[in-house]
Structures are given as C-alpha cells and as structure tokens.
Image (cartoon, grey):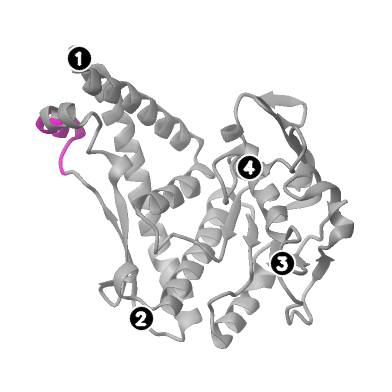
Amino acid sequence: MMTIKQLLIRRFRNYSESCFDFGPSINLIYGANAQGKTSLLEAIHLLALGRSFRTLRLPDMIQKGAEGFFLETQFESNEISQRVAVAFDPPEKKVIHNNTQYPALSSLIGLLPVITMTPDDQLIKGGPDSRRKFLDMQIAQSDPLYLHHLTRYQRAMRHRNHMLRSQDVNAIEPWEQEMARAADYIVNKRKHLLESLQFLTQEIHERLSGGMGQFHLSYESNFEGGLMEQFQKTRQKEMHLGYTTVGPHRDDVMIQIDDQEARHFASEGQKRTCVTALRLASWHLLKQQTGRPPLMLIDDFGVSLDKSRRQQFLECLPNLGQVFITCVDHLPLDGMDVKAFEINQNYLK
C-alpha cells in the first residue's frame, strides 16, 4: 500500500503556505472556482512525475510576487515512511528524496506512481504527441530502463538533427546507431503496453457505456523495417528539412470504437468515456506492474459524463486506493471512506 500522509505547499500558484493531512482512501477537494483545487492536484503530480499537467514551465507555478516555490510530501510505501521535496528558486532546482538530492526532476518518476484525469484531457482529441506522452509516462513509472532509452534516443536525435542542418553527415552514423538501438526498446515496450491495456480498457469501457461499442487500440508506426535502413532512405530529404522525420518520436496510437477512429467519428460523450476507461485501465495495469495501487488524481470529477456513467465511475472509487478528487460541490459518496477539504481563502493564506 502507498499513501500520501501530508503535503506542504509554499508560494505555489495562489497558495502562500498550506499543509494538508490526507486520508488513506478518498480525499474530496471542493469549493468555488479559482480557489486552488486544481493547483493542489498539480502539486501532487509535480512531486510524483517531476512535471505539471498544466504547463511545461516551472516559473508559471510560482505564486505572484514570490521568488520561488517549495513542495514537500510525507508518504508511506510498504509501511516505510518517506519524504520527497521539490524547491525551485530560479534558476536553481532542488529535488530531494529522503536524505538524497537527485540530479533532475525526472528522477522522481516511479517513486509515487500516479494516474491523472483532467477535463481537458487531450488523449483522444489532441495530436500524436499527447498519445506518445501517455505511453511514455505509463511505461516509465514501472520501468526505469525505458526512461534511460528514451533519453538516449532524444539526445542522439538532437546530434543527428544538428548534423543534418549543418550538412555535415560524415560522423552521423554512430548517432543513428544509438537511435536505432534505443528505438527498438521504446517501440517494443509501447506495443506491449497497448496489448496489455486492450482487454482491461474494453472491459471498463463496456461497464461505463452499458456495453455500447467495441474498443480497440493499435500502435501506428511511421516506418517499416530497421530504423538504420530508413535513415539511409530519408537522409537526403532530411538534410533539406533539417530534422529527423522517421522514428518513434513520430509514432501514434490509433483509438477506435466499432472500427472507426474515435478522434474523428466519436461523439464528445463517447470520447470522454474512452478517456475515462483508458485512465482507469492504466491505473489497474500500473498496480499490477508495481505491486502497489497508484495514486489517482481526478480533476473536476465526472465532467462531460452523463448521469449513468458518472454513477458507474463513482462506484469504482473505493477500489482505487488513495484518490484525490476536485469538484465544485459535495459528491454523493455516502458509505465511502471520505476526507473532505473545502478550499477557500483560509487555505491560501
């Protein structure tokens, strides 16, 4: 079992300084709009994955008028108490796990496995990069080697792109070979993840939708055969463009309902149901892979779901370990283990 016991926030978004003592099951975070409910989930997400789900820029999260922010959580994993802290005083970042300082925010990935659901989730409606990010974050939380290979691939590609732009390809092959080796690992892991998610997602989708629609996931690669062979074929064109056009950084995931691409043919309600099913399936798979229930962060609970699907979703909550839910009003959670927090100006001071 893994649970966050306490969260300390200083100079983060609209919080000056606040401390939260969370319950082990459902934590309901409610209140008026623009009070800081989503920012609370964002802080947990940053401590778990080293990144926000709202912005790529750390300065965006500093409280207006402050010089930096500080986040700290006390959590328990397998009955062992641990601490994670992130301090950002531009340009310096400090990442601390227990008594060890880590070199980068990405070093946090895997310490606090987490699945996040937001109302503007771009998993279906967004571009291929949103679906690649979904795959990469899901795999990296259970497989440290994946992040290693992904980093190697991206670093080698930067070198290759530089050589393409400078029209100097005499020493390009070693970087292409490194990309090819890393790409094999990345693509195989992504395909295996989708195969593992297929059955889980279909089962949850049937429950949420009342058995309507067959759900299917498939990996869409932008190249065939070995990557080194593709580099040979595309090198001249890429020298003109100045960047790499083939490889896992350009791949995508096809999400279909009844053999039609959900992105183009599904209704808004169907898309939301698909995303909910995928995120819940991701939670269950990550639990299997890590041996502990991940944190579940749900922003604006049930938005875009109809009454029946909201109720089906509510019934899932007691089985999702430690859950953090934001909403404007109280939810019908009678009989469930709930700790409620009304976010208002008192928390923000």
Mark closest to the chain's N terminus, 1 or 4 = 4
Disc 3 to disc 1, C-alpha distance: 54 Å
Q: Residue at x 26, y 30 (%)?
A: 180
Disc 2 to disc 4, C-alpha distance: 40 Å
Q: Residue at x 57, y 34 (%)?
A: 106
Label 1 residue SS: loop
Q: Which amino acid does the dot numbered 1 rest on?
A: Asp
Q: Residue 168 got which mark?
A: 1
Q: Which amino acid does the dot numbered 3 rest on?
A: Asn
Mark closest to the chain's N terminus, 2 or 3 = 3
Mark closest to the chain's N terminus, 4 or 3 = 3
Label 3 residue SS: loop
Above or below residue 53? Residue 99 is above
Mark closest to the chain's N terminus, 2 or 4 = 4
Q: Which residue is mark 4?
A: 60
Residue 346 image offset from top left, x and y in percent? 89, 58
